[in-house]
Image (cartoon, grey):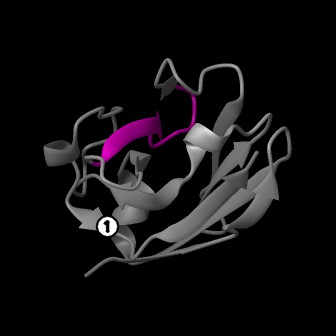
C-alpha cells in the first residue's frame, strides 16, 4: 500500500512563494511517476504538474508554467512543488498523487493516478 502525506501549505500574499512536499511510503514511489493536482473553491480538481519516475521529464499546466517547479528526491521518497509568484487564483487544496507501480511516464489526467494524499490548503491573499 502507498501513503502520501502533503505538507507546506499555508497563507501567503500575492507574489510570494511556498514549497509543498509530499512524503511517500511504499515501493510504488520508486517505480512511479508523480503529480500534483489542485481543487479551488467550487471548482473541479485540475492538473498542476507531473514528473516522471527518473525526474528527467516534467510537465506543467499552462496556468502555472514558468512559476511552479516540480522535483523529486527518490532517496527521500519525496516529491516537491516549488510555487513562486503566487496569485489569488492559485488558492486551492493541493493534492499529491502517484501513478500505479511501474507507470514511470508522466500522467496528466486524474484517472491515471491510483494513490492520493489528503491535500494541503494553499491560500493566496491579494
Q: Nearer the viewer, residue 21 or 77?
A: 21
Helix, strand or loop at label 1? It is: strand
At x 66%, y 69%, the residue is 76
Quarter occupied by the N terminus: bottom left
- State the residue in front, 34 or 68: 68
Q: Toward the viewer: 38 or 110? A: 38
Q: Residues within 10 Å of mark 1 (few under 14, many from 20)?
A: some
* Image side of residue 16 versus residue 8, left or right: right
Q: Is residue 69 left or right of residue 113?
A: right
- The residue labelled by disc 1 is 116
* Residue 28 in sight: yes
Could you tell me if residue 51 is visible in this image? no
Residue 54 falls within the magenta-colored stretch: yes
Which percent across, then down, holds residue 37?
Answer: 40, 48
Image coordinates for residue 97, horizontal then vertical, percent:
36, 58
Residue at 58 percent of width and 27 percent of height: 64
Residue that protrudes farthest toward the front in the picture: 126
- Count of marks overlaid on the render: 1
* 6 left or right, relative to 40: right
Left or right, 30 with respect to 8, comes to left
Q: Position of residue 121 (x, y in %)?
A: 56, 68
On-image quarter of the C terminus:
top right
Q: Horizontal and vertical percent for residue 51?
A: 49, 37
Residue for point 80% across, 34% down: 85
Q: Residue at x 52, y 39 (%)?
A: 54
Q: Note whether 5 is above or below 121 in the view shown.
A: below
Residue 4 magenta-highlighted: no
Q: Which residues are magenta?
A: 45-57
89 in relation to 118, above or below? above
Amino acid at each position: 500500500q502507498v501513503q502520501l502525506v502533503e505538507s507546506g501549505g499555508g497563507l501567503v500574499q500575492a507574489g510570494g512563494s511556498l514549497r509543498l512536499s509530499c512524503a511517500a511510503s511504499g515501493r510504488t514511489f520508486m517505480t512511479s511517476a508523480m503529480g500534483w493536482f489542485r481543487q479551488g473553491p467550487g471548482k473541479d480538481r485540475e492538473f498542476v504538474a507531473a514528473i516522471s519516475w527518473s525526474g528527467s521529464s516534467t510537465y506543467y499546466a499552462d496556468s502555472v508554467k514558468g512559476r511552479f517547479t516540480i522535483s523529486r528526491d527518490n532517496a527521500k521518497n519525496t516529491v516537491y512543488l516549488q510555487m513562486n509568484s503566487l496569485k489569488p487564483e492559485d488558492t486551492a487544496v493541493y493534492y499529491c498523487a502517484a501513478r500505479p507501480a511501474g507507470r514511470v511516464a508522466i500522467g496528466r489526467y486524474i484517472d491515471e493516478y491510483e494513490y492520493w494524499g489528503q491535500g494541503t490548503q494553499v491560500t493566496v491573499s491579494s
